[in-house]
Image (spheres, helix red, strand yellow):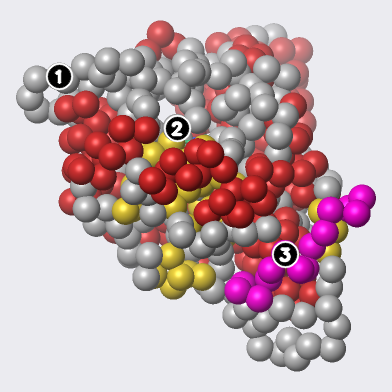
């Protein structure tokens, strides 16, 4: 059959833009060559289309088909381009701390109690006077339009539908004003300090003016991180990326500093602060927390703490709370799961501050264990991006619903009807 060259060109362009082809490393010049080549080339091209568009029966076709959050991961992998996938999955060095985060939950067993009336269950949590349906927080996670064209907006709509706290990253690809409008309520804002205090202060003021009640200052990347997996996956991506990335190669998060990235699509960073730059001398220390507090009326949280000593310092410097977090195993390769760090920190904090825990939360039982060991709330990162990359807003909503359902089951099974009732008495070390 003879096709009109214009429609063939459009078809090739359409295919080349599809994440399916990008993730398979097939770029536009290859497709053009195959479709305009010999009949053999053309048959190879149509074979590729068949292969890549055929539904793999092991993958879920709809968000509603998922049994657990892991069901979204392979679907997202298929839809997200390789370099962006590398950004999502990478840890540091050999990624061992990602595994340590997961393994940590296996070190704790449950001590369920019986014959408690569990017909009425309350999974809600109050954070800074706002009631959320569950303690599951959508952690700050950069560049969400790299995973789905709606990015942070789809996440905000899901957070609204399910009433969850969303924390927006400094390196988000959507502005805080638009995210708050889509969420229909304030979100918290995460800060990466820049090398120019004037710029950092302007960003803080913008978040405050947008209505964010809290600022989450991330402190676990100040020395940089070695993200080998991200680089290796990036090499599989043959697309021409100059449109979005200066120099053509995506390289976010290389040094851990925001100043040296390509910030064109990051609304918080793209606008230079009016006025003279005020260069930082050295990297931030605890005084910086006080400086933030003196700059804003927002509550201040410190993200990335792993020791009771730092938990105490955070409180002494006026923080309202902390995120016990190792950045999802992508900061330092500490080999310590965050859940292993939690008991000492909770003991030190003694209820004086809000304690969020994140890293490797994938099951309702993980959430239950974190609550038992002293967390006020828990955060998820990659799981909601699996949902976003697979099915957009619907996928994020499904991930939140699955985790909630699993949490409800374990709460009922353990004989606990509210989060407050989940105390250390409901868990014990597995080898005890
Ligand atoms: C792709 C990716 C980007 C992230 N971006 C940020 C960020 O911009 N700011 C931040 O404080 N944490 C960031 N994090 C860390 C998350 O907030 C969270 O601590 C972590 O993802 C939780 O672990 P989990 O992915 O195992 O659930 C990022 C994590 C991932 C995976």
Q: Which residue, as the protein is rendered here, is positioned at the far right?
A: 431
Q: Which residues are magenta?
A: 419-432
- Find residue 425 and report its horizontal and vertical position in percent: 76, 68
Which residue matches tag 3?
424
Q: Position of residue 251 (x, y in %)?
A: 49, 17
Check disc 1 and report the residue beneath it: 277
Q: Is 80 displayed left or right of 315 in the figure?
A: right
Say what secondary structure mark 3 lies in: helix
Say which quadrant the C terminus sits in: bottom right
Horizontally, residue 92 falls left or right of residue 285, namely: right
Q: Is residue 92 above or below residue 54?
A: above
| Residue reaching furthest to the left | 275
Near mark 2 (Cα within 10 A), the count class, few <14, some 14-19 or many ≥20, is many
Q: Residue at x 66, y 88 (%)?
A: 120
The residue at the point 69 percent across, 9 percent down is 38
The image shows residue 11 at horizontal and vertical percentages of 53, 29
Which marked residue is nearer to the observer: mark 1 or mark 2?
2
Q: Nearer the viewer, residue 168 or 414?
A: 414
Say which residue label 2 marks.
219
User: From the viewer's perspective, is residue 337 above or below residue 403?
Assistant: above
Residue 371, given in percent of the width and then of the height, sits at 65, 62
First in sequence: mark 1 vs mark 2: 2
Q: Mark 1 or mark 3: name the one nearer the start of the chain.
A: 1
Determine if residue 183 is in view: yes
At a point 64% along the width and 48% down the height, the residue shown is 344
Q: CA gap, disc 2 to disc 3?
A: 28 Å
Q: Is residue 423 magenta?
A: yes
Instruction: Tell which of 432 and 213 is nearer to you.
Output: 432
């Amino acid at each position: 059959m003879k096709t009109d060259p214009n429609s063939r060109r459009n078809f090739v362009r359409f295919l080349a833009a599809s994440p399916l082809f990008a993730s398979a490393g097939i770029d536009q010049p290859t497709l053009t060559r195959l479709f305009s080549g010999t009949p053999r080339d053309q048959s190879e091209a149509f074979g590729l289309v068949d292969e890549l568009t055929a539904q793999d029966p092991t993958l879920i076709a709809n968000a509603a088909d998922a049994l657990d959050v892991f069901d979204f991961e392979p679907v997202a992998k298929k839809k997200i381009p390789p370099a962006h996938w590398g950004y999502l999955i990478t840890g540091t060095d050999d990624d061992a701390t990602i595994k340590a985060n997961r393994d940590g939950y296996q070190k704790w067993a449950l001590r369920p109690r019986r014959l408690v009336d569990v017909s009425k269950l309350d999974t809600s949590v109050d954070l800074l006077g706002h009631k959320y349906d569950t303690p599951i927080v959508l952690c700050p996670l950069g560049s969400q339009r790299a995973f789905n064209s709606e990015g942070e907006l789809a996440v905000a709509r899901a957070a609204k539908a399910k009433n969850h706290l969303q924390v927006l990253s400094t390196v988000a690809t959507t502005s805080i004003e638009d995210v708050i409008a889509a969420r229909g309520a304030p979100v918290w804002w995460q800060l990466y300090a820049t090398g120019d205090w004037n710029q950092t202060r302007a960003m803080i003021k913008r978040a405050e003016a947008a209505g964010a009640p809290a600022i989450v200052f991330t402190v676990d990347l100040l020395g940089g991180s070695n993200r080998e997996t991200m680089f290796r996956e990036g090499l599989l991506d043959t697309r021409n990326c100059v449109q979005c990335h200066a120099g053509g190669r995506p390289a976010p998060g290389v040094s851990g500093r925001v100043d040296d990235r390509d910030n064109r699509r990051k609304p918080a960073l793209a606008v230079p602060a009016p006025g003279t730059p005020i260069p930082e001398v050295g990297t931030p220390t605890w005084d910086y927390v006080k400086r933030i507090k003196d700059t804003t009326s927002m509550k201040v949280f410190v993200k990335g703490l792993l020791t009771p000593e730092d938990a105490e310092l955070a409180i002494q410097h006026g923080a309202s709370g902390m995120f016990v977090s190792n950045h999802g195993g992508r900061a330092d390769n500490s080999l310590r799961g965050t859940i292993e760090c939690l008991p000492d920190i909770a003991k030190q904090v003694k209820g004086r501050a809000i304690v969020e825990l994140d890293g490797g939360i994938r099951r309702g039982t993980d959430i239950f264990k974190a609550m038992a060991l002293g967390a006020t709330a828990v955060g998820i990162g990659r799981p909601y991006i699996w949902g976003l990359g697979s099915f957009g807003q619907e996928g994020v909503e499904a991930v939140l619903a699955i985790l909630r359902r699993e949490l409800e089951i374990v709460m009922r099974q353990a004989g606990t009807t509210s989060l407050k009732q989940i105390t250390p008495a409901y868990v014990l070390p597995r080898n005890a």
